[in-house]
Image (cartoon, rainbow, N blue to C red):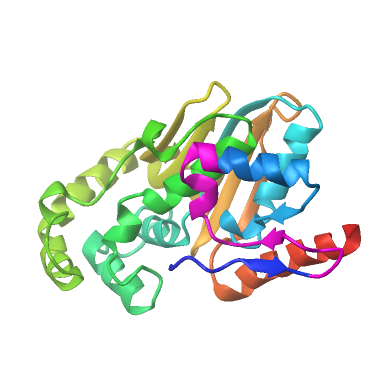
């Protein structure tokens, strides 16, 4: 989805306070991010951006709380894209169902408005990578989009096609590629999920991965997001799951941030 503008509060006690779902400033140039953080701390100004990751899910606030209370982050792992969640929950499942091609699922998702106008903007992994970068930086890691291992699952031959219509018309030619990936996973009682991972050692990746049928990521449905925090205090991961996309839950996240400022101001 297109990035939304910030909500900037003004007034004698709330000047220069920022609430935004916009990911770009928080996942872009690392020096700019550090300048924003330093300015917020220096001038005691609030800067809230819960909805940059997981819409209204308390992902950002939870990670901040873990870090601020001295917990050690071992790994943050999650399905951060509602679009990719929907695609692979329907394409790769542990429950027997009628076989549907990957291209048909993308087509349905596009018709329902679940994807960007050009689905390649979802399938290239950049949106997930921005969210992973944001969480990594909150965890205290100097990571950026350039340091992440990002898997673009758009078939290479389709990346340079001029229009979304051209892409959609040629995507069925690569259904066998996705079918093979799915069959290989199913043969091991696994499913495919597009996942972002941040390691406590500063490494990060955004990839199509395989998970066993017993894993929490395997039972995800619809377009839900799920995030697992593995820390020193929580060796069995702390899991947050629910709707991670959509206008209503995004507005919920923004309003929640506004109310936090109101309570503290």
Q: Position of residue 106 (x, y in %)?
A: 29, 66
Image position of 100 (left or right of 142):
left
Q: Position of residue 17 (x, y in %)?
A: 74, 60
What residue is at 39 percent from the left and 45 percent from the top? 191
Q: Position of residue 139 (x, y in %)?
A: 63, 33
Quarter where residue 129 is shown: top left
Q: Is residue 139 above or below residue 89?
A: above
Q: Residue 18 in magenta? A: yes
Residue nearer the viewer, 136 or 14: 14
Image position of 221 (left or right of 38):
left
Q: Residue furthest top?
A: 201
Q: Is residue 127 above or below residue 21?
A: above
Q: Residue 104 in magenta? A: no
Residue nearer the viewer, 44 or 159: 44
Please state, as top left, top right, bottom left or bottom right, where the C terminus lies in the image.
bottom right
Quarter where residue 170 is shown: bottom left
What residue is at 69 percent from the left and 60 percent from the top? 18
Please state, as top left, top right, bottom left or bottom right, where the N terminus lies in the image.
bottom left
Q: Is residue 214 visible?
A: no
Magenta stretch bounds: 11-32
Residue nearer the viewer, 60 or 27: 27
What residue is at 17 percent from the left and 54 percent from the top? 159
């Amino acid at each position: 989805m297109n990035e939304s503008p910030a909500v900037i509060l003004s007034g004698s006690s709330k000047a220069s306070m920022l609430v935004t779902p916009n990911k770009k400033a928080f996942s872009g140039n690392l020096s700019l991010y550090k300048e924003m953080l330093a300015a917020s701390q220096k001038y005691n100004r609030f800067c809230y951006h819960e909805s940059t990751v997981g819409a209204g899910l308390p992902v950002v606030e939870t990670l901040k709380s873990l870090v601020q209370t001295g917990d050690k982050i071992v790994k943050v792992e999650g399905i951060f894209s509602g679009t990719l969640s929907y695609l692979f929950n329907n394409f790769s499942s542990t429950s027997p169902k009628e076989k549907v091609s990957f291209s048909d699922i993308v087509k349905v998702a596009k018709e329902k408005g679940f994807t960007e106008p050009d689905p390649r903007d979802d399938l290239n992994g950049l949106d997930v990578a921005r969210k992973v970068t944001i969480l990594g930086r909150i965890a205290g890691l100097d990571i950026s989009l350039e340091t992440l291992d990002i898997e673009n699952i758009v078939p290479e031959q389709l990346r340079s096609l001029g229009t979304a219509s051209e892409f959609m018309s040629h995507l069925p030619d690569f259904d066998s590629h996705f079918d093979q990936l799915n069959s290989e996973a199913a043969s091991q009682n696994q499913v495919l999920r597009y996942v972002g991972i941040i390691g406590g050692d500063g490494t990060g990746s955004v990839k199509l991965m395989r998970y066993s049928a017993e894993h929490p990521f395997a039972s995800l449905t619809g377009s839900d997001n799920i995030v697992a925090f593995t820390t020193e205090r929580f060796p069995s991961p702390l899991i947050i799951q629910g709707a991670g996309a959509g206008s209503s839950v995004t507005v919920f996240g923004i309003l929640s941030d506004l109310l936090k400022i109101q309570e503290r101001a």
